[in-house]
Image: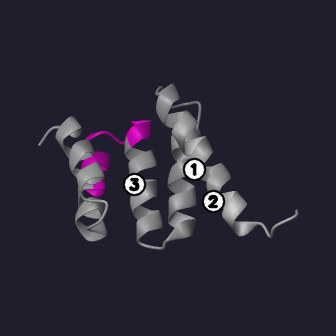
Amino acid sequence: MSLLTLLYQIKDNLRDSKTAASRAEAALALTPTVAYVFYNRGRVMLALDRSEEARADFNTAADTKLKQPGARKLAREALSAMQSKESPSGE
């Protein structure tokens, strides 16, 4: 299965988080240095209410060592949104 197919399957299966998680693992096995894969697995981890794993994936996707600036931007935005949800209002 191609990486592009797996990425689309992750996106299409976010409502079925277990399927999406298995697709994300398969995508990582194919390409462990693609930021979009980490970003999408982070989205799956959030859907599974596994926020620490999501944060780790978003941090990996945001790393400048990975070459996909679009994915890095999305990952930084996801981290910011997570931080906003965790911080009490007014701080």
Q: Which residues are magenta?
A: 24-36
Distance from disc 1 to disc 3, alpha carbons, whole Å, reads 12 Å
The reply to whether residue 33 is in sight is: no
Query: Helix or strand or loop: what does disc 1 sit on?
Result: helix
Residue under numbered circle 2: 82
> Can you see residue 17?
yes
* Residue type for callout 3: Arg
Q: Quadrant of the C terminus?
A: bottom right
Circle 1 residues within 10 Å: few <14, some 14–19, many ≥20: many
Q: What colouring method underlies this structural image?
A: one colour
Residue located at (47% from left, 65% from top): 46
Give the label on residue 51, or none: none
Q: Is residue 86 left or right of residue 50?
A: right
What is the distance, in whole Å, between disc 3 and disc 2 at their CAs?
A: 15 Å
Q: Residue furthest right?
A: 91
Residue at the image position 39 percent from the left and 49 percent from the top: 40
Element on which disc 3 rests? helix
Q: What residue sits 24% from the left and 59% below the top?
A: 13
Of badges 3 and 2, the one in the foreground is 2
| Residue wearing tag 3 | 41
Label 3 with label 2: CB-CB less than 8 Å: no
Q: Name the mark nearer the viewer: 1 or 3.
A: 1
Circles 1 and 2 in contact, beta carbons < 8 Å: yes
